Amino acid sequence: MSKEAAIRTGESSPLLLFRQVSPGPGDSTMQFRLLHFWDARKNVKGGPGIILGIELLLIDAEGTVAQGFIGQNRRNQYEKELKRGMIYTLTNYYASNNKVMYHVADQRLVICISHASELRKVEEDIEAILTERFRIHSFADFEANCDLRGDLHDVVGHLKLVDGNPLHQRPVLCIKDDSASRKILVHLQLKDGPVINVYLWDEAAENFRVKFDACADTPTVLLVTTVNPKRLGGKLCLSSMSSSRVFFDEEVDPTKEYLAWLATNPSVTSLVNPVEVVKAETLTIGEIAAFIKRQPAQIAYFDCIATIDDVKLGTEWYYIACKDCQTKLNRGPTTLLCPKCGNENATAIANYRVELSVYDNDEQCTFIILGDAGKDLTGRKATELIDAYVQENGGDEAEIEVPLPQCFIDAIGQTKKFRIKVAHYNFTSSRLSLTATKIVSAAELPPKNPPLKTLPGTEVENTELGESSGGGASAIEEEKKAKRTKRSG
């Protein structure tokens, strides 16, 4: 079929809605607006990747968003006629349900251009078809879907830092043609959660740079579409994908609404000092306990300096986890099942889960060492320690009971700075048990009774510190001075 026959100004035809599409070939006619298109790539380690074709983001008259696809062999036939925002009709297509990761649309079926397809441009605009539709998620939603490689949703918030620079001095963004210019790191404050790191790559980074520099005033609000929630160093981060787009202040309805909300809530812009969001706030055990007692349930990260006093014995020091999302696997009749991914034949790895009794100058509690924190402490992965024990002692790895490695006993008496994750269960538990996702560095306990610190923009009254949404309300119980005796290993 020639390009002229495949794409031409439209004629009226019976219209099929996206919700009515069923898997396989179809000969009905559908009408939609083309919201966005981008290269579909297969990643190749150490290379630029292989271009597989063009992916499309489409929206119909009901506001349902679907994903489309044009194979690389048909690229030349269609690409020049694709224009964002235009209305098209499509007759003859193939609806595929093979896409299992990184969905960007409500409709699970992908509308594929086939050899028999007729894609026609409609020159007149149809106002009934929306020009944009977003799927904005909250911090809690991203936390729940972290590392699942499932749906990609959108995020909106107000800017705190751009490449480490606060906005009161407008940042000058890198424009060199090198790897540094391929990435922009944005610290974004969400309505419902702490400041979150958003990594913009390649085209999304370039789009951000061009729009940012073109703004007469420094932008305040940012919306990024189709971000991938990942955990880096134990902290939730968002990463742009090939499909991602960026919008500022007055560009689209969600950014306008957020900007209006900021105008009626001006105090929220000063809740987190932009100089402080680059690193986690360092709190004592007592200050973290006070934060949990006084704040609404939320996910938060802190650093905490503590000395290891003991290791809990009598429990397994590792668990069998899903390689993709680190969730504990359930054993099925013949395979391992992941309750989070839904994978019925999950790939298993061993992950640390060790309970340490720790103390600082004023308090004592339990730190649960997970994942990377265990490797930081011992210098080895859990699987390496298990394999070493099996090789020395023989037996079946699946059946043998591996005792707590000596390296954990040797850690007793050491003082470390731990990265602590406060999770929702901490706000309902009667026992103070904190999860450590990373060991930042070796450390020393500060001198007892240091002068109280004042968080920027707050006042100190008695022993109570001011609050910031990034971390902290706290009360230091001065009367608790119990001496601890380090246990030697």
Image: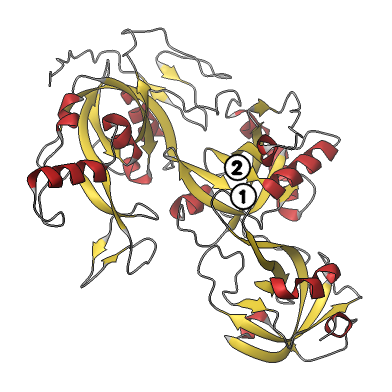
* Of residues 218 and 181, the one drawn nearer to the viewer in this rendering: 181
* Residue hosting label 1: 240
* Residue hosting label 2: 199
Tell me the kind of residue under disc 1. Answer: Ser
* Of residues 277 and 184, the one drawn nearer to the viewer in this rendering: 184
Q: Is residue 473 left or right of residue 72?
A: left
Q: What is the quadrant of the N terminus in the image?
A: bottom right
Q: Residues within 10 Å of mark 1 (few under 14, many from 20)?
A: many
Q: Residue at x 76, y 71 (%)?
A: 75
Q: Vertically, is 344 above or below 264? A: below
Asked whether the beta carbons under mark 1 and mark 2 sit within 8 Å of each other, the answer is: yes
Q: Residue at x 50, y 54 (%)?
A: 141
Q: Vertically, is 137 above or below 74? A: above
Q: How far is disc 1 from disc 2 in space, using C-alphas?
A: 6 Å
The spot of residue 123 in percent (x, y) is 91, 75
Tell me the kind of residue under disc 2. Answer: Tyr
Occupied quadrant, residue 416: top left
* Of residues 178 and 239, the one drawn nearer to the viewer in this rendering: 178
Nearer-N-terminus badge (1/2): 2
Q: Is residue 15 left or right of residue 366?
A: right
Q: Is residue 13 left or right of residue 430?
A: right
Q: Residue at x 72, y 85 (%)?
A: 115
Can I make out residue 416 in this image?
Answer: yes
The spot of residue 473 in percent (x, y) is 44, 26
Give the structural element (helix, strand or loop) at label 1: loop
Give the structural element (helix, strand or loop) at label 2: strand
